[in-house]
Each structure stands twice: as structure tokens, then as C-alpha cells.
Amino acid sequence: MKTALCTIAFRERTFEEVLDLACGAGFDGVEPWGKPDHIQSDWDAESVERSADEIKKRGLKVSQYGSYANPTSAKFHDEMVDAIEIAEGFETDKIRIWAGTCGSAKASEDEWSKAIARLKEFADRAAANGMTLVLEMHVGYLTDTVQGNMRLLEGVDRSNLRLNYQPLYTDSWESVLDGLGQIATFVSTVHAQNYVDVGSNERSLVSEGFVDYRTVVQVLRKAGFDGYLEVEFVREDDPEAALLADSKFLRLLCAIKQ
């Protein structure tokens, strides 16, 4: 396993400044945030090349490209093509993607059908380029429950469609652990988020919240996980100190032998 920083964690800073933070904190890689002012969401060869060079200069890898491609978007086909081009420019074989325009409980059958059909197309295009799609687990999308994620994975039925795991603050620790056991074999990347308490969107250090990441990583290891543990957001008071603490903790988890 390795560690990475999602550049969205410091979205108000320049891309280069965030890369410097990643280096200073000891991360192995970064997940470029696929929105301005970090990365243009539309394919721009020169812009991506400049950003990729800045990453390489610092000895970092791109863990995955943090795109906003979504199969239910009106601009889906353009988003799909651009995401693949940008990922190639960053020399990564993983593209983080989204699914849906509402939570799974509110989605119509048409929305599920459209998402599954277009994800099949996206996965096949990605596979032709040696890439894996990584579905963002997130409140407000089709991926907001274990059942929603499994419906997409089983409906698409492509080995290069995987999950970007992150526990939701709305779930209890028991629910988080139970859900993880059901999807662990499909997890490609982890956004290591933690919260002060169940139901609170107030972030804590990864090591201090109600989610026990030692157990999370143990479950994932047993399922064969060997991807990136990523910091996506940091505790808001003294964010740079929080970043250093989170990086140290995640690197410790990577070093623990099963």
C-alpha cells in the first residue's frame, strides 16, 4: 500500500503549492482534483503536460485522476473522452468517477438503467486503454449505500469497474464495518476520511475519529487490497499540522505487516 494526497484538500492554494505540501508530508503520490484552478476538466494537452511535469519533478506519482465524469450527465461522452485523455497524460491507470444525480433511494429506474448502460460503455473504453474506473462512494449519488454500489457493480459486470471507498459520516461504526465486509474485494482506492462523531460532518484526524482505520485497513488487506490510502480533506483548524499527522498515521498503517 501507498499514501496519496487529494489536491482538493487545499483547493484554495495553487496546484504547485499543494504538491509541495504533499512532498513535505511524505506522501507517495497525489490525486489531481479535476476542476479549476488545479486541473482543467476539459482535455488540454499542454496544461496536463505542465501539471504532470510538476508532479514528476517532485518525485510523486498520480494515484488516480479525480475526474467528475458521470454517466448520467448530459455531457457524459465528452467527459468520458476527456477523462481518459487526462489520465493518460498523468500516466495513471485509474480514473475516479461519479454516478447519478440523486441518492439511490430517490433514483428512478431510468436513471439506474442509464447509469449502468453508460458505465458499461465507459468501462469498455477505459479497458481498451488499460484503465480502471473507480466509483466515488458519496452521499447524494447512486453510490450512497452498499446496496447501491453493488447494484452498479453487478449490473455493469466489468472487472475494471471498482470502488473508491470512504466511510460516510451518517453511518455508525458498526454499519461502516458491516458494509466494508461486503464490498472490500471491490475496493481500489481509499479516501481516508474521519469524523468526530456519527452524524457530524466535522472532520477529525484520520487516527482520532469514530472510524477505526486500523481495522479498516486490516479488513482490506485480507481482501487483497494493495492500493493507495488517500487524504481527501483535513481537520480545518491548523490544516497543515493535521496533514502531517494524517500522513504519518497512514504511512504507519501501510508499514504494518498482516
Image (cartoon, helix red, strand yellow):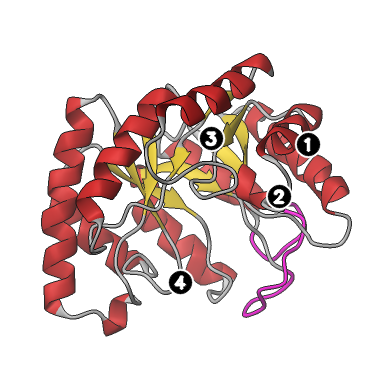
Q: Amino acid at mark 2?
A: Phe
* Label 4 with label 3: CB-CB less than 8 Å: no
Magenta extent: 196-211
Q: Secondary structure at mark 3?
A: strand
Q: Amino acid at mark 3?
A: Tyr
Q: Amino acid at mark 4?
A: Val
Between circles 4 and 1, the one closer to the viewer is: 4
**In which image quadrant can residue 245 be found?**
top right
State yes or no: residue 200 in magenta.
yes
Q: Amino acid at mark 1?
A: Lys
Side (left or right) of 109 relative to 23: left
Residue labelled with disc 4: 139
Residue 157 seen in the current view = no
Is residue 166 shown above or below 186?
Answer: below
**Residue in the foreground of this view, choosing between 257 and 60:** 60
**Residue in the foreground of this view, choosing between 195 and 4:** 4
Prevailing secondary structure of the magenta residues: loop
Residue labelled with disc 2: 10
Side (left or right) of 195 relative to 146: right
